[in-house]
Amino acid sequence: MKSYRQIVEEAKTEIPEVTVAEVKTEQDKESDFVLLDVRDEDEFRAGYIPNAVHVTRGMLEFSVENHIPDRDQKIVVYCAAGLRSLLAAKSLREMGYTDTVSLAGGYRDWTAADLPTIQDKPMTHDQLDRYSRHFMLTEVGERGQAKLLNSKVLMVGAGGLGSPAGVYLGAAGVGHLGIIDSDVVELSNLQRQILHRTESVGTPKVQSATTTIKSLNPDIDITPYNLRLTADNVEEIFSEYDLIVDGCDNFATRYLVNDAAVLMNKPIVHGSIFQFEGQVSLFKPHDGPCYRCLFPTPPPSRHGAQLK
């Protein structure tokens, strides 16, 4: 039976090794290659090489194709010190990946050379548990969750559209939510506006929404705006956020949101419903049409009263 050392030495005869200086040079040249980090989760949380794709060695054969579907793509594999990466690169070769090399000295030599590293936002033990299902998703992972926790989203409206948006944004771990709405909770709201409860009737919707989201996820910072969005305050409010979720119930506000977002280069997720019909769109300023481009003028006001 072969020892671990013998297996590593055998891998060295099959897998080329590159130095940290060579990898940094290729990065600076913007060469076409994937840097693959196969360390464990706790090692990756402590810091990683910029632009690295992370797949733990234990999950490599199961999930690497989700991250690197092209088997002819050049891959530089690294671990802590350059041993696991040799075995991982060898496994990739056996899976049909044609151009795999190992980073000699791994992350240890990279940091010793004082080369750039990144550390995502640290998470508490509770957060690691709360968001663990996100970590299993290739499209999110721990790095994506860290971005969510650092993001700032403004919800315009806390009614029929804002309610599900607020619940899921809070549950997903969007770090800072702004909620703007000037209405109070009415009994007739409760059959659809799931942010609110019977005991909240008569209270401001932003207060009720804050209580509900905080009870679901205390991680979230919430800024309530118990006021109407106007031309006088829209720029000041929008300046604090990365993304606008437009769930308002009237066309005047919808066009105001659009015009301010275009002016300030803020992306908008727009949703609207009428009875059993609805639509959702993402408007990214200067990268496609805006809401006003699609609908240059509002419909007659009688329709505006029906938009919920």
Image (cartoon, rainbow, N blue to C red):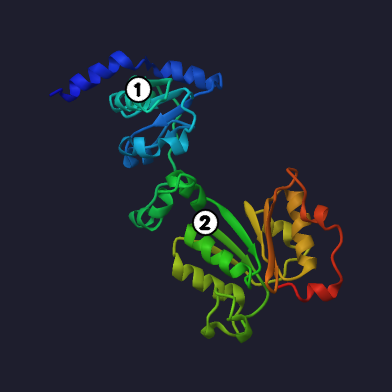
Q: Is residue 41 left or right of residue 161?
A: left
Residue indicated by mark 2: 174
Q: Is residue 271 visible?
A: no
Provide residue 304's location: percent of width, then percent of height.
79, 72
The N terminus, quarter of image: top left
Residue type pointed to by label 1: Asp
Task: Locate residue 176: give its quadrant.
Answer: bottom right
Q: Is residue 251 left or right of residue 129?
A: right
- SS label for mark 2: loop
Please identify the quadrant where the C terminus is shown: bottom right
Write the residue at 44% across / 42% down: 120
Question: Residue at 62% across / 81% down in the picture?
Answer: 189
Which residue appears at 39% of the width and 16% of the height?
A: 19
Task: Note whether 67 is above or below 13 in the view shown.
Answer: below
Dividing the picture into quadrants, the one containing residue 99 is top left
Instruction: Measure the alpha-carbon separation of dots 2 and 1.
Output: 35 Å
17 relative to 287 in the view: left or right: left
Q: Amino acid at mark 2?
A: Val
Q: Earlier in the sequence, mark 2 or mark 1?
A: 1
Q: Position of residue 15 (x, y in %)?
A: 34, 17
Q: Identify the residue position indicated by label 1 in the image.
A: 109
Badge 2 crowding class, 10 Å Cα cut-off, few under 14, some 14 to 19, many 20 or more, is many
Q: The residue tagged with tag 1: helix, strand or loop?
A: helix
Report the disc number at residue 262. Answer: none
Q: Nearer the viewer, residue 99 or 124?
A: 99
Q: Residue furthest left?
A: 1
